[in-house]
Amino acid sequence: MNEKRIHFIGGGQMAEAIIRALITNNKVSTKELSVSEINEVRCQYIRETYGVKSQLETETGLSKADLIIVAIRPQDDLNSVGKLIRDFSISGAVIVSIVAGVTLQQLALAIGDQYPIVRVIPNTLTDTGKGYSGVSLNEHATKDQVHDFLTGFGKVFYLDETLIDVFTGFGVAGPNYVYYFIESLADAGVLAGLSRELAWEVALENVTGSVMMLRNSGRHPRQLLDINNSAGGVGIHALHELNQSDFAAGLQRSVLAAVKRTKELGEGV
């Protein structure tokens, strides 16, 4: 990554995850990073854990930053943050927002429509290098300005902003659905009589291997299900029972609920 000074406004869990991934993946050096955070305990933690400059005040970091990462909560005062950016940011600074539910238009109203503004919904698999972040750009921003930064903590899909909320509820919240499924599968093994350790290991291996089979074979899940299920066999009996449950519809309702909540988060901004 070309050397760029990156300042985070907000040092919460998602900001920390991005910082950790950037440093671990050698995308940036600690001297290129700074964080402003209103919680002194959090500031101290970031300084001591990552060796990144962290302070309560925002002005110094903004005055040197090429990339400004807005990492506040949706309910925080975005207008005050916008004023700080207008007053102290350098010419040509790119604004990257990871604030859930807040649109490019809302960001431009709060910060200024002359800035390159990038709306990012970060994935939560930052420590793995897997998972996709959803990204939308305003008319002043380009992929070249942020691509190296964004790929420092995973993969990227550039999307029309009309799809961002859907992507959030489906893609970015996606690990939650997978974690819940794995937990439930392991519990089923324990219920059937396996030890917790064995059920957990088998569940993880089956999920990992199944993903590899889908990728390597290029086949649809239904095709692999057909291969696995012989007439009158164990697998088809298990699927028959699962088909009578609310599993598929429940998962789909969960995604729609997550999309709905994403849209709600931006309504009060």
Image: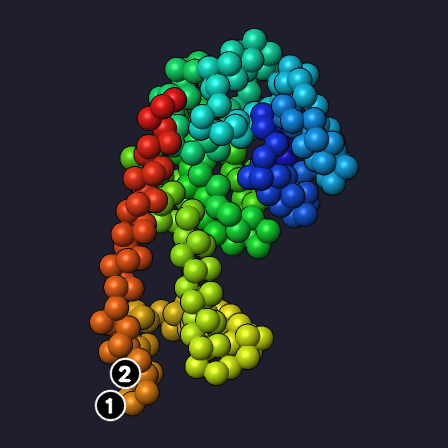
Residue 185 screen position, x and y as percent: 43, 71
Give the amino acid type for the residue marked by disc 1 in the picture. Answer: Ala
- Residue situated in front as seen by the camera: 10 or 209: 10
- Examine the image and state in which quarter residue 223 appears: bottom left
Residue 192 screen position, x and y as percent: 43, 81
Give the labeled residue for mark 1. 231
Residue 133 screen position, x and y as percent: 45, 44
User: Where's the C terminus, which quadrant?
Assistant: top left
Colour scheme of the rendered structure: rainbow
- Residue situated in front as seen by the camera: 173 or 4: 173
The label shown at residue 190 is none
Residue 67 screen position, x and y as percent: 57, 26
Give the amino acid type for the residue marked by disc 2 in the picture. Answer: Ile
Give the labeled residue for mark 2. 236
**Looking at the image, residue 145 lies above or below residue 194:** above
Mark 1 and mark 2 residues within 8 Å of each other at the beta carbon: yes
Question: Can see residue 227?
Answer: no
- Residue at 38% x, 73% y is 217
Q: Crowding near pointer 2: few (<14 within 10 Å), some, many (20+)?
A: some
Q: Is residue 238 left or right of residue 79?
A: left
**Looking at the image, residue 14 lies above or below residue 125:** above
User: Where's the N terminus, which quadrant?
Assistant: top right
- Separation of disc 1 and disc 2 at Cα? 7 Å
Q: Crowding near pointer 1: few (<14 within 10 Å), some, many (20+)?
A: few
Q: Is residue 218 left or right of residue 148?
A: left
**Looking at the image, residue 182 lies above or below residue 59:** below
